[in-house]
Amino acid sequence: MSAIQLATEIPGPRSRELFARREAAVPRGPYNATPIFVKEGKGAVLVDVDDNRLLDFAGGIGCVNVGHANDAVVKAASEQLARLTHACFHVTPYEGYVRLAERMNAAVPGDFRKKTLFANSGAEAVENAVKIARAATGRQAVLAFEDGFHGRTLLALSLTSKVHPYKSGFGPFAPEVYRAPYGYCYRCSYNLTYPSCAVACVDVLEDFFKRYVEAEKVAAVIVEPILGEGGFVVPPAEYLPKLRELTTRHGILLIADEVQTGFGRTGKLWAVEHSGVVPDLLIAAKSLAGGLPLSSITGSAEVMDAPGVGGLGGTFGGNPVALAAAHAVLDQMETGLLYERARRIGDVVSRRAAAWRERFPLVGDVRGLGAMWAIELVKDRATKLPARDETAAVSKKSFQKGLVTITAGTYGNVIRTLMPLVIGDDELAEGLDVLEESIAEVSA
Ligand SMILES: Cc1ncc(COP(=O)(O)O)c(C=O)c1O
């Protein structure tokens, strides 16, 4: 039986009515990728308020790697909700916080003693990581990358690259933030070609430290192991190891922002594991608590203890219900089954995507790792002119056929796959059929 069941026109009358109310009551700022309102989700299927059943390739932007309404997450969170909803770790601490910190310390790469702090969102994790790096190094500057995304609060937004719509009109931004090109081989800023380039995009940072900011002033380099919002860009294998070597040489801390890449998405718990790189600080959020708001910052005990007592925290950071959910997520990650699923999804998606690249000139590049795949659309393969409107059209057509997708990329010309990793083989095939049909229609 088909997972997608469109009972009515889409959006149906209830969604349309709610949208009218949304427009009257909620600012236009928060973008809505689809015109439906959902009422339920299970696994990789969403049910909207008009009883349409849709397949979900977005996972609430990568937050439900264990699936919507995951049984173990629901059980753990509901039991915790009834026992203790909130206490504030600063006032009367609770064991779930310490136990998850212990588990994260063991799960994050690095053969040294670690500590973990919890916050609520990815942006908050970014802010805390920078605070910790500054306190630990006594330096102020932070280097981020073009096409990087690190959140929407002021410091995180300052580190974020994409101007429209994220930054436009919101300045002034935090000082001492610098930016260099990422290892985006399909659109190399230096017009070089991998592997003959020898990953020069890292080597040029030595020059960057001469022209823009001295290395001795740089507290941290913050990097996504694979760009998320920036278009699911997988850098060359040597990229992160070279960045690690460069930062170590200059006493700069390396912050791995695994908010989107973490928790099994790439076929391992962390994307950095594919490179063997051990970052100084690793931050997670999104799928960490299976859809509840929770983020983490993990690093060596020495670095994490640099800020003084009272220097870190927040009212809700490490909420007991979110922590209980995260324990249930980590239990499932530790079985390894979801990593296998991610790799299997990646095999299937990559084969289909490679065929699309052969068949449709619109498909300029396909790339990915595990279940994190990008289909980058271009108007012309030679000029690589981004096909933004066509990408929006593919996403819209897919939605009308019952598949929820989201786009990415500075030019909005990338379709990305963030389906729950529990998606069934038949569901995956059905979703990919929809995507293929939509690309074919837009290509025609
Ligand atoms: C890599 C990365 N860092 C940080 C963030 C910000 O996370 P949040 O939206 O939870 O603040 C995101 C969100 O998409 C992200 O992808």
Image (spheres, helix red, strand yellow):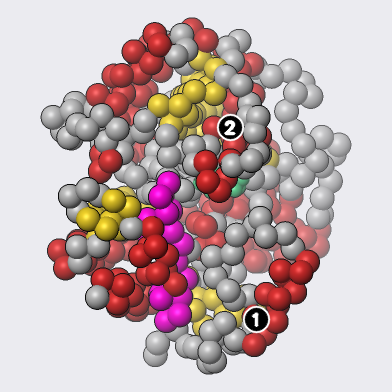
Q: Is residue 166 above or below residue 22?
A: above
Identify the secondary structure beneath mark 1.
helix
**Alpha carbon of mark 2 to alpha carbon of mark 1: how far?**
36 Å
Residue beneath the point at 66% across and 55% down:
29
Asked whether 255 or 115 is in front, the reply is 255
Question: Mark 2, residues whose alpha carbon is within 10 Å: few (<14), some, or many (≥20)?
Answer: many
**Residue 385 versus residue 399: which sits nearer the camera?**
385
Identify residue type, mark 2. Ser
Dot 2: element: helix
Residue at 77% of width from left, 44% of height from top? 316
Q: Which quarter of the rendered image does ligand 1 occupy?
A: top right
> Considering the image in quadrants, where does the C terminus appear?
bottom left
Task: Indicate left or right for 146 with 384 as reference.
Answer: right
Question: Does residue 198 lie above or below 357 as drawn?
Answer: above
Looking at the image, can residue 325 be seen?
Answer: no
Q: Residue at x 74, y 48 (%)?
A: 319
The magenta segment is: 397-416
| Residue tagged 2 | 158
Q: Earlier in the sequence, mark 2 or mark 1?
A: 1
Q: Position of residue 251 (x, y in %)?
A: 46, 11
Residue 398 shown in magenta: yes
Q: Give whichever of 20, 231 is nearer the camera.
A: 20
Magenta-drawn stretch contains 112: no
Q: Which residue is mark 1?
A: 16
Find out if the beta carbon at label 2 lies less than 8 Å from the nearest ligand 1 atom: no
Amino acid type at circle 1 is Arg
